Image (cartoon, rainbow, N blue to C red):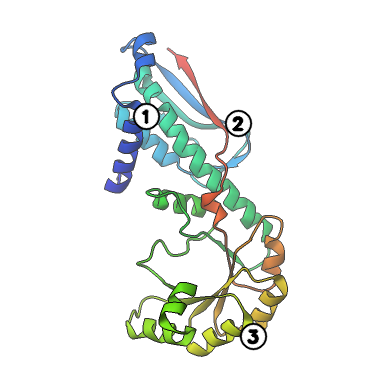
Amino acid sequence: MLSSELETLIRRALDEDIGSGDITTACTVSPTAVGGGRIVAKEPLVLAGIEVARQVFWAVDNDLEIILPLEDGSRAMDGDLILEVGGNLTAILMAERTALNFLQRLSGIATLTRAFVDKVAGTAVRILDTRKTTPGHRLLEKGAVRAGGGYNHRFGLYDGVLIKDNHIAAAGSIGKAVQAARACKLHTLKVQVEVETLEQLDEAIAAGTDSVLLDNMDLLDMAESVRRAGGKVLLEASGGITLENVKEVAATGVDFISVGGLTHSARAVDMSMEIEPA
C-alpha cells in the first residue's frame, strides 16, 4: 500500500516535471500509441527505489503493466534490466524522467553504502547513515542505505538523544547535559554524547551515557577510546570517514561508523530507458 507521504512526494515530483503538460510528447506521439520501455543499468550498481519507480509510472497511468526483475538490494551489472513497462506511450514518456531520477539517486546511495560495507567486511562494525539527507526525502534515502547493507541512525530529532557541543555549552557540562536528559525520563530512548577529546570521553562515561560519538578523532585516539570504554558504552566514529580510511577506523574496535556522505554526497548511478513502440 502506498503511504500518503510517498504519494505526496511522487505527486510533487511529477507536477514539477510535467507542469501544464508534456508538449514534446503531445506534438510527436499519438495519444493512443502503445509500446514498451526498458530501464537498464549502464554501470555496476546496487539497486534501490524500485518500488518508488513503479509507483511513479502508476501515478501517471494505473493501467501500465510493469515487470520488476530485481528488488532493492540486488546487484546489477551494465546492461541488466531494472524495470520493464508497457502500455500507453504518452504515459510512459511522461513518467520516464521522474522514475529515473528516483532510481538513479537512491541506487547511488545504496551503491556507495555497499562499497563502505564491503570495505569493513569481516569486522563487527556497522555502517550508519546520518540526518544529512535531502529535505523531504529522508525516508527514501535511509531506505536506500538499508538496501546497501547499512544501518539507520536516528531518523530525526524525535527518536534519539544526541548531546552535541552546543547542547553541552548550553547545559554547562557533559555531566549536566546527561543528567538533564535522564531527568526527562525518556525510558525508551538511549542517550548518546558527542565528544572530541579523551577527557570528554571519560566525562561522558562517568556521566552514565549509553553511547559516545567520537567526532573527528584520529586513529590513535579512537583506539585509546575503545580501551578506556572497555565495553561499558558503545562507540561510534564519525567525521572524515572515507572509503580509503574506513577499514583502518574499523580496526580500532569501534562499534559503529557513521558516514554523512552516504546520503549527502552519493553520485547518482547511470541508467537509461529505451522505448520500443508496438
Label located before the other in sequence (2 or 3): 2
- Distance from label 2 to label 1 (Cα)? 23 Å
Q: Earlier in the sequence, mark 1 or mark 3?
A: 1
Residue 26, given in percent of the width and then of the height, sits at 34, 13
Q: SS of the residue at dot 1?
A: helix
40 or 163, nearer to the observer? 163
Identify the mark nearer the N-term, 2 or 1.
1
In the image, which disc is placed on residue 228? 3
Q: Is residue 217 found left or right of 19 in the rendered image?
A: right
Per the rendering, the mark at residue 42 is: 2
Depth check, front residue: 158 or 83: 158
Would you name the residue on which mark 1 appears?
17
- Give the amino acid at mark 1: Asp
Three-letter amino acid code of the residue under disc 2: Lys
Q: Is residue 102 above or below residue 273?
A: below
From the viewer's perspective, is 254 left or right of 12? right
Q: Position of residue 10 (x, y in %)?
A: 34, 38
Q: Residues within 10 Å of mark 3 (few under 14, many from 20)?
A: some
Q: Secondary structure at mark 3?
A: helix
